[in-house]
Image: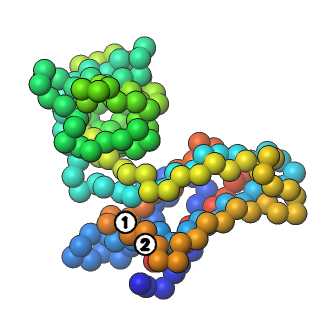
Amino acid sequence: MGRIQSKRIMNNTDIVVGQSTGFGNVAVFNGITVNAIAPASAAAGTFRVYEDVWENPVVAMGDFSSSANTFTINPAGETFKNMNLSVGDGLLLAGASESANNTFKYITAINAAYTVLTLDSVTGNATEEMIEFAPQRVIFQFNWDYAVNYSKDLPTLSFSFTNGMVCKNGLTIRSTSWTNIEAYVLYS
């Protein structure tokens, strides 16, 4: 294991990537510390650490429905089963005709037949000829609410993993809110 480094994270777009090797951009997640920037103000969020799985995006045809926040795969007989998706996984979508759908989405439900994904949000109703799904796997998740669990004398929550969690293609940190929050990610 290499030298453990720290990187300040203050939004969902920061990606921690290891050095390029013949085996991808391997990064080891060693822990995270979350702080309230101004302890007198509110700070709360659900944090997720994802392993990036960009090398195997899947291309599918299907229909977006904004009223149900779903994507239904077409034609009949096709499924998402071979993607090994789970509720809570993230997907980076690309190629959608409605540009607001070309973004990161959380999977909130999957029907039993693996033909319909319910996502955290969908914009517009559209039939897509080719949309690319690049999954991200949740490797660690926790809730942090400064007002409920901490005091002005202890504004920090830390998790550390001595041996780390290996992420083949780097890792991404996301939170439901970054208002008044900073995080320091430990990685090697």
| Of the pair 103 and 28, the residue shown nearer to us | 28
Is 156 above or below relative to 174?
below
Q: Secondary structure at mark 1?
A: strand
**Residue shown at 40%/38% (left/top)?**
87
Q: Is residue 66 above or below residue 85?
A: above
- Horizontal and vertical percent position of residue 31: 55, 68
Residue placed most toward the observer, 53 or 99: 53
- Residue drawn at x 79%, y 60% is 155
- Residue at point 17%, 23% (across, down): 74
Q: Identify the residue at horizontal 35%, vertical 17% (top origin).
A: 65
Residue type at mark 2: give it: Val
Say which residue label 2 marks.
28
Mark 1–mark 2 Cα distance, whole angstroms, equals 6 Å
Residue 126: image quadrant is top left
Q: Which mark is residue 21?
A: none
Image quadrant in which the C terminus is located: bottom left
Q: Which residue is mark 1?
A: 167
Residue 20 sits in quarter: bottom left
Q: Is residue 86 above or below residue 7?
A: above
- Residue 100 visible within the image: no
Side of 29 relative to 70 (left or right): right
Of residues 22 and 47, the one drawn nearer to the viewer in this rendering: 47
Circle 1/circle 2 CB separation < 8 Å: yes
Of mark 1 and mark 2, the one earlier in the sequence is 2
The N terminus is located in which quarter?
bottom left
Where in the figure is residue 66, as x and y percent of width and height? Answer: 40, 18
The crowding category of the residue bearing disc 1, from other C-alpha atoms within 10 Å (few below 14, some 14 to 19, many at least 20), is many
Q: Secondary structure at mark 2?
A: strand
Amino acid on which disc 1 is placed: Cys
Numbered disc total: 2
